Image (cartoon, rainbow, N blue to C red):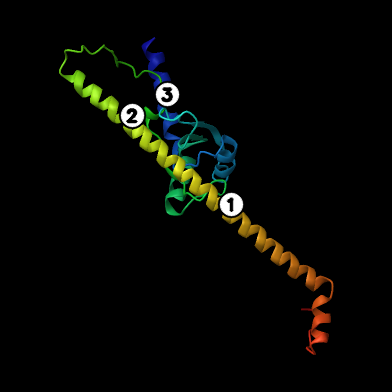
Amino acid sequence: MESTAEAKYAAFEEKVKRTIFLYNLSPQVTKAVLRKALDQFGTVVSVSFIPNYLESRNFTCALVEMEDSVKANKVISSISQCPFMVAGMPRPVRARQAEVEMFDDRPVKPGRRVSCNWLNPRDPDFEVAKKLKRLTRKHAAEASFLLKHQVGREEKLHKQQAETLRANFKKYETIAGVLSDRTAQKLAGHYGMRVSDDS
């Protein structure tokens, strides 16, 4: 029984070694988008978002399991060397090696015992716990406000980038149209200029 638990935990530790922790993701990024973005480095085995328990809808971190630890290290190295954008979102993604504590489904480490107890209101630490609880709520409200502000700015910038791209495409499409239907030659003739046929 104990050897089975040890083998299970050893397999889990190997999984951790080939898993990347991605953060600073846009809330609009999906599992399919992450798979497509990281497939260039190697086969992506699984993608799981880490839920933000202070927010109901937003995921900005993910655990991505690669086929082996070499590919995982390659992703981390590449992302740390240059800005890595996912889905055109104007925020560079960050990456580092995953840690055991990041997995909700981690098995119990052999030989480890965990116990939980209710804190008595007369305990000196009870007031400390209450202060920590209030502080956590305050930080959750601040994080929620900042995240909404950041997403709003990203959407605005994304819209500007899309409009610029469309305008540039239309400009080059117009230039290509002018050159293809001999309009440039007609204009040159009208103004007394010479234009070669291969221009």
Judge the density around disc 2: few (<14), some (14-19), many (≥20) Cα neighbours within 10 Å: few
Pointers 1 and 3 in contact (CB under 8 A)? no
Question: Which element is circle 3 on?
Answer: loop
Q: Residue at x 41, y 14 (%)?
A: 4
| Closer to us: 183 or 18 | 183
Under mark 1, the amino acid is Lys
Which of the two discs, 1 and 2, labels the residue nearer the N terminus?
2
Q: Quadrant of residue 169?
A: bottom right
Q: Nearer the viewer, residue 109 or 146?
A: 146
Q: Is residue 13 visible to us here? A: yes
Q: Is residue 170 left or right of residue 143?
A: right
Q: Is residue 192 left or right of residue 131?
A: right
The residue that appears at 40% across and 35% down in the rendered structure is 98
The answer to the question of whether label 1 and label 2 lie on touching residues, with beta carbons closer than 8 A, is no
Residue that protrudes farthest toward the top in the picture: 1
Vertical placement of residue 77 versus 136, above or below: below
Using the numbered discs, state the Cα–Cα distance from disc 1 to disc 3 in whole angstroms.
Answer: 36 Å
Which disc, if any, is residue 159? Answer: 1
**Around disc 3, counting alpha carbons within 10 Å, would you say few (fewer than 14), some (14 to 19), or many (20 or more)?**
few
Image quarter hosting the N terminus: top left
According to the picture, the residue beneath numbered tag 2 turns out to be 137
Q: Which residue is mark 3?
A: 104
Q: Residue 139: give x, y in percent of width and height.
A: 33, 34
Residue 66, x across and y down, in percent? 51, 36
Q: CA distance from mark 1 to mark 2?
A: 33 Å
Q: Name the amino acid, label 2.
A: Arg
Q: Provide residue 114's location: percent of width, then percent of height.
A: 29, 15
Identify the element where label 1 is drawn: helix
Q: Is residue 32 above or below residue 111?
A: below
Question: Callout 2: helix, strand or loop?
Answer: helix
Q: Nearer the viewer, mark 1 or mark 3?
A: 1
- Using the numbered discs, state the Cα–Cα distance from disc 3 to disc 2 in whole angstroms: 22 Å
